[in-house]
Image (cartoon, helix red, strand yellow):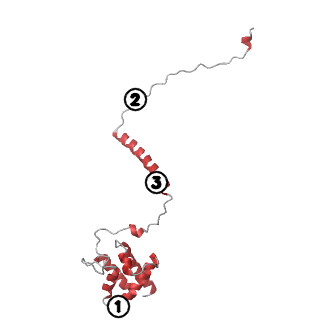
Amino acid sequence: MSHASLSPAIDHPAPITQSVPAAAPPAELTLEERLTLVNTAMTARLDEAAVAYEVNTAHIPTEPVDLADVVTVPLTPTLQPPPASYSTPVAALLQRAHHRLLTGGWCSGALVDEDGARCMLGAIRAEARGDSGLEADAATVLLDAIRRRFGDHVDSVPSFNDAHGSSRVPIRMVDQAAGLADARGL
């Protein structure tokens, strides 16, 4: 017996050289399949962009959005009869002023503009029909409502009215003032 025959047999596997079949050429995609593929790719890119945007803007301080500023009325509002009037005189006056602003239009910089639209105080004055005491009480409640919402730095109803470029906030404040006057029994 030779030495070589006593050593354990170590099998070294021969390298496998299998031929991998060549990938079949891609089949022609149908229009639906291409659209699905592009849609999937774009959705992935949009998702990545959304995450990147959130990461890149997380440090920017933002103010909460008041939904009442976002929800708007139709461009051609239909005239609605005014809701049931408040039973107290100041609240009823503010409610009528609110309705006048909704139906007759709002303006800034003047009590009444050339089209007949009115500012907040102009609507109150028109609906007070010459009762200066009632007009003054309504303006006081309106200023209180404005200051509750926007702070004590608001000097007057006209300055608040003229500080706005659209009617949404001023008209909403007249409506809120009507509710405040009713709650106070005015």
The mark found on residue 64 in the picture is: none
Mark 2 vs 3: CB contact within 8 A = no
Q: Which numbered mark, 2 or 3, is in the foreground of this view?
A: 3
Q: Amino acid at mark 2?
A: Pro
Q: Can I make out residue 125 in this image? A: yes
Q: Amino acid at mark 3?
A: Tyr
The kind of residue tagged 1 is: Ser
Gap between marks 1 and 2 measured at Cα: 89 Å
Lower sequence index among marks 1 and 2: 2
Report which residue position mark 2 lands on. Answer: 25
Q: CA distance from mark 1 to mark 3?
A: 55 Å
Judge from the rendering whether residue 1 lies leftward or rightward of residue 174; answer left or right.
Answer: right
Upstream in sequence: badge 1 or badge 3: 3
Residue at the location (45% across, 75% down)? 150
Image x and y of residue 19, in percent: 49, 22
Q: Residue at x 36, y 82 (%)?
A: 95
Mark number, residue 53 = 3
Tag 1 residue: 132
